[in-house]
Image (spheres, grey):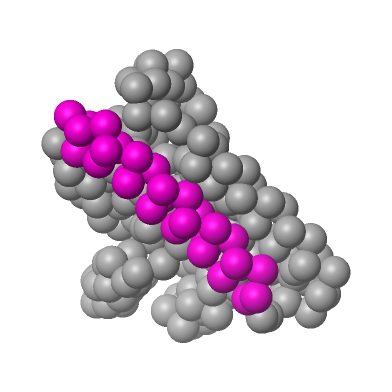
Amino acid sequence: MPIETLLAFAIASVVLAFAPGPDNIFVLTQSAMNGARAGVAVTFGLATGLVVHTAAVVLGLAALIQVSPYAFFALKLIGAGYLLYLAWGAFRARPETLEGENAGLSALQYYRRGIIMNATNPKVSIFFLAFLPQFVDPSLGSATYQMLILALVFFIVTLLVFSGVALASGWLGSALARSSRAQTVVNRIAGLVFVGLAARLLVTER
């Protein structure tokens, strides 16, 4: 693919990654609550979830989600249910047990959270279905191969941008962790954010 096309796609991907959305808000709240390590692990999980959506687009499953209200609704329910589960945990978290809770969760568990968060959002597949083909030139050969290259670029951009968000919000969370009242506020805000993301996902139209 021409370097000009890849550069244009990379710039568009950076802008999209920085735009407020469920994924980067999720990274921000997880980092503020549980530290930068958790946020980076979640970021890798979200990026891995992009692999699922890339496969869906390449295999044509995203088109099925777009035309089937049942498949779209089922994914929305799964994703919203998981976000509400995280909100419940955030509301119940006690400041004095925050460090113990962080120590008990492994990077793999946070990584899994990121995968579930991204893979259960049907809008990502539909976004890929609409976004990637705009940078594909049939005259250059296999469209599938080109979309895989573009997906790899998007994957790298997501890792870099979201990891930066995780490190910044993790530093802020560490500063707040010295105050039990601040911990409570962060947990309550995170819970409300999770509820808001769940509501947004439920009302999302195809």
Instruction: Answer with left or right where residue 78 lies relative to residue 19.
Output: right
Identify which residue is drawn at 65% across, 75% down: 203
Rendered position, 34 above or below 54 = above
Give coordinates of residue 164: x percent, y percent. 21, 49
Give coordinates of residue 188: x percent, y percent. 41, 48
Identify which residue is drawn at 46% across, 83% down: 134
Q: Quadrant of the C terminus?
A: bottom right
Camera-nearest residue between 45 and 79: 79
Camera-nearest residue between 17 and 137: 17
Give the residues drawn in magenta, as a range.
176-204
Which image quadrant is residue 96 in?
top left
Q: Main secondary structure of the magenta part?
A: helix
Camera-nearest residue between 119 and 62: 119
Identify which residue is drawn at 46% across, 62% down: 22
**Farthest residue, direction front:** 181
Which image quadrant is residue 183 in?
top left
Residue 33 drawn in magenta = no
Give coordinates of residue 155: x percent, y percent. 39, 53
Q: Is residue 198 visible?
A: yes
